[in-house]
Image (spheres, helix red, strand yellow):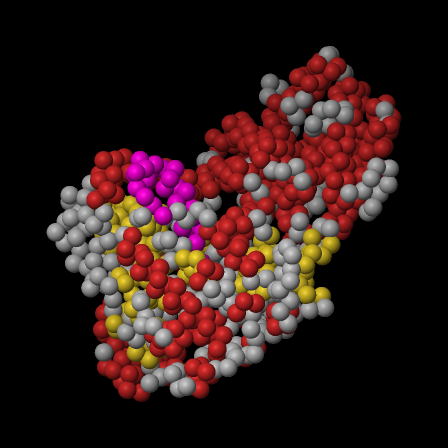
Amino acid sequence: MLSRVADSIFWMSRYIERADNVARFIDVNQKLTLGFQRTMNTQWEPLILTTGDNDLFKKLYGEKYTQENVVQFLTLDSRNPNSIISCLDAARENARCIRDNLSMAIWQALNKFYLMIHAYPRDSYTYANPQKLLDIVKDRSQLIEGAAELTLSHGEAYNISRLGRLIERADKTSRILDVKYYILLPRVQDVGGNLDIVQWAALLNSTSALQMYRRAHGRIEPKKVVSFLVLDRFFPRAMHYCLVHADIALRFLSGAPPYVFSNPAEQLLGRMKTNMDYISVDDIVNNGLHEYIDSFQCQLNELGVNIHDAFFGNTTRQSMHQSQSQYVV
Amino acid sequence: MFSDYPVPPCFDELLTREHESRFPTVSLALTNLGYQEIVDRQTVTDERLRDLGITFAVYGHQDGNEKVWPFDLLPRVVGHEEWQQIDQGLRQRIFALNLFVDDLYNEQKILNDGIIPRGMIETAATFRKECVGHRPPKGVWTHITGTDLIRHEDGQIYVLEDNLRCPSGVSYVLENREVMKRVLPEVFNGQSVAAIEDYPERLLDTLLATAPDNLESPVAVLLTPGIFNSAYFEHSFLAQQMGIELVQGPDLVVVDTYVYMKTIRGLRKVDVIYRRIDDTFLDPLAFREDSMIGVAGLMEAHRLGHVTLANAPGTGVADDKAIYAYVPEIIKYYTGEDPILQNVPTYICSDPAQRDHVLKNLENLVVKPTNEAGGYGIVLGPRATKAELDECREQIKADPRNYIAQPMLQLSTVPTMCPDGVEPRHVDLRPFVLLGGLDAADMYVLPGGLTRVALVKNSMVVNSSQGGGSKDTWVLG
């Protein structure tokens, strides 16, 4: 496969996953604030902080972190390069460059998704009631991943796409956890209250994890939720799962056997994965969840650079201009 | 369906002046379906094309530069016998033009014999000195051609242009057919329409047949200028259909006069390049230094026979509209036969007597620059303002070699779905010819081809960039 094509598939997948996760961000925030209007109605600012585009937001909207402004900024505002609509533009543009490498089902699903989002009314009603829009984004993203699963040969293109998806998803799951940190955990003693349980449940729900969590752990306990979203090996949005399967995809591409690495990307990913294989949730919480997530995200960034060097380094194209990460705190 | 159809004074492809159908089975099938039903299906069709992203890029458009190319559901039908004649005429013409290009870059017999003035070739901007002495594998220069045909009001088919460089449009032919089968199955059923679905296979055969010698399994790629090119959809479509890589200039590299593509597992050798980039952008070392979409060293690899370029660089010289005027002589010279397909009478402005005639009759003629494609720079005398004619006159005087003039031809019409009902709209036809060698069996003519239709009433400009659409073309068996 051409290096340039691999690069485009990688970023196409990352951008689709990113759009999906922005929808989940908003979703969790919406659910966290609903029902707690009196105390929580100013809680849209942390969402912007966690996505790392605060400077741009302030430039466009001033300091007005209202729901309408924040939702607009994150969904249909083309001026924000990480809004849902911008992610879809970028995903489709990448796909258009490599259309011949995709199955018709994937292209069509993505193109329809793009057209739907572009046709969506951009008005205050949408920003006050974003649920329908968010559902479209989540459904369509799943449709594309399903199309890839069923219509693309599970060879190079598939594995690159999967690598992009999983890295982006690991990053975003960690951020969704961080939203919780910003909104709800300013002080350690707040952990465990009644309100807290409801909020953890909302968090799980927004990652489609509530049912699976219940089956695995039953009652909601903050530590178990952290354990589930960080360390679970079987839940597809858990950070550990993402790393395990990213490692499989990466090794498919390089052809390296187990227990050795053939490039710095494999080395780093192997280390990150092994760390998660053997760390316990107590280790994480005792040393600080936020610190753990922060370091995880830094390593993911470095991994992105290493993957670029190992596989797309031949390209002179835009890859390096596509954002490796949106996170600056 | 067609009872109120206003048959125009020019030639209509479906109905005679007496309002009789030339292809009764087709018009009956359409009538059985009814106008309103076809309107509904046209809506479905437009949505489908949009969802599939079958688009072309329009340069200089602000609101997103991708447009869905309008597709009209009413097919353009060509009868069996007439098609046989077109098919034979195209084979004869392309065969002769390929020999002509080969001769020009080698022995130049046709110039030495005085059939074509040497000065005409030497002043052609498309004559590539870099190609002199070259002979590509199997002697094939013009692997893929798309000849533009029109039918005048006299009922006769004429060749308007030869398009020997990178003709586009075949992807729309294939997609149009797919859409037709999907949305108008009742009309399709029961007609014997010549199949076109094997074109990608034939194209791949043609490319591989002209690979450098002695290769067991040659590797072909399609070289595109990139996503912003107006024909990008087609490049991507054809690469996908043939299962070959779609590459851009920076994906290729020349090492020790061989061409390679950069893959995630290192370099991989490339033997045949179906290039959709103009000659002058191919190689910054040989042509334009500022080309960002070319590959340094590509021309040398080509000259050494280490890679096949399709079409070969240099074929544009036979596209020059002044040289077009000589094609009947060219056919005679290389085949000894009379041309089967007619040329449009053409005045060459570099010839003083012909130029005088053109300048005096400008308001009745169509003036064309000799080296432009896509309808750019054309002045339609009968429809131009006085100021436009004056400007045109000055341009001809300043650079006569760059202009030719032809009588204004009436394009034929085909019934077309219009907002107020079925109306006649002007069309042309671009059949595609593949040449994989110099034997008759190495040639393939796609039955039918691309019918472009001017959707604006009375307009004869069919170019996609200027309000044109397309139709499926049915060659009946």
Image height of B334 relative to B220, above or below: below
Q: Main secondary structure of the magenta part?
A: helix
**Quarter assignment of residue B446:** bottom left
Image position, residue B276 (x, y; %): 52, 61
B283 is higher (above) or lower (below) than B48: below
Indicate left or right for A224 with B32 as reference: right
From the top left corner, tell me how far across and down residue A50 is, in percent: 69, 36
In the displayed structure image, the side of residue B459 where residue B202 appears, left or right: right
**The stretch drawn in magenta includes residue A245:** no
Determine if the magenta segment contains residue B188: yes
- Residue found at x 79% / y 36%: A296
> Residue B332: x, y in percent?
35, 75
The answer to which of B315 and B138 lies nearer the viewer is B138
B115, above or below B244, in the image: below
Q: Residue at x 25, y 38 (%)?
A: B29
In the rendered structure, which segment of residues is drawn in magenta? Answer: B166-194
